[in-house]
Amino acid sequence: MQMPFWKMHGLGNDYVVIDNRDQKISDAHVSRWAELLCERRFSIGGDGLLLVYKSKVADAKMRIFNADGSEAEMCGNGIRCFAKYCYENGIVKKTEFTVETLAGVKQVWLTLDGEEVVAVKVDMGAPNWERSSLPMVGEGECINEKIDVIGETYKISCLSMGNPHCVTFVGDVDAFPVYSVGKLIENHKAFPNRTNVGFVQVLGSGEISVRVWERGCGETLACGTGTCAAVAVAHRLGKIKDKVTVHLLGGDLQVEVGKTILMTGAAEKVFEGTLFKEPLIRV
């Protein structure tokens, strides 16, 4: 077996990327492959595994698996890496193309420096505010409602950006205990399929800071859908204007709110290699 791969990241949110159009990695084993390839120190390491497939409805199809083997519907940082990978490997030789995801077909626009992709804009779609879209227990919308987390009360707003998000505002995001609170909210009984959790500090009408606890990964250096969810909630509550710079641990993203949410940011290739045998299954 010889299977080329790229190691990539979007603002520190890192992935193993493999062209799986020949389906060398079967559906029956893909979750286990994700666990093994993403295990840090013992393997390549990453927050997730991105796989390229052929698509009947778009220029390419992306599947993304978290480090715990669970499949995610969509990932904003991941799709930027995916778009760069597809273009630079000749899978799609257009600077504007479509990507099929579990959250629907997404449009991407590439910014080039020669033949290198240096930035990607993604139409992330419109947020879905219905609890059923996450899913979340209850009916209707959850906007600025109280939730109890082990005796502490937080005000949350929930939405789907193709995947589930719970957003809460904090006074000092750098000092906030994201690990403990994020893990508890992710697994709260209100979210049958778990949820991503965004902690947001508003710095001004065009600037926010965000930390995201990702379902199946833990806290990551950046989260594209989490960023868009935070912006959508802050905009709906009147805390920010239509265009905003979002500061994440791994860097900045530019987000614009209109009929849909547009996100622009970098994607980086770290290194490439070849797998010569299946990942070692340790017991």
Image (cartoon, grey):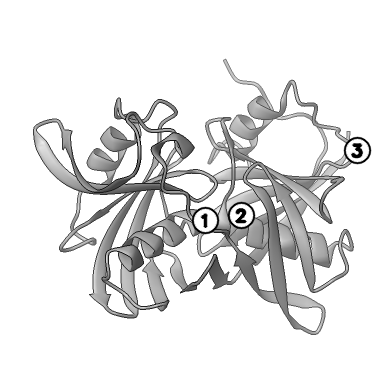
2 or 1: tag closer to the N-terminus: 1
1 or 3: tag closer to the N-terminus: 1
- Nearest-to-viewer mark from 2 and 1: 2
For the point 76% across and 26% down, the residue is 27
- Residue position for label 3: 22
Task: Look at label 3 and name its amino acid.
Answer: Asp
- Residue 123 in percent (x, y) is at 61, 65
Q: Is residue 149 visible from the viewing direction of this image?
A: yes
State the residue in front, 192 or 33: 192
For the point 44% across and 65% down, the residue is 250
Badge 1 element: strand
Badge 3 element: loop
Q: Is residue 216 visible from the viewing direction of this image?
A: no
- Mark 1: give few (<14), some (14-19) or many (20+) Cα within 10 Å: many
- Asked if marks 2 and 1 touch (Cβ < 8 Å), the reply is yes
- Residue position for label 1: 13
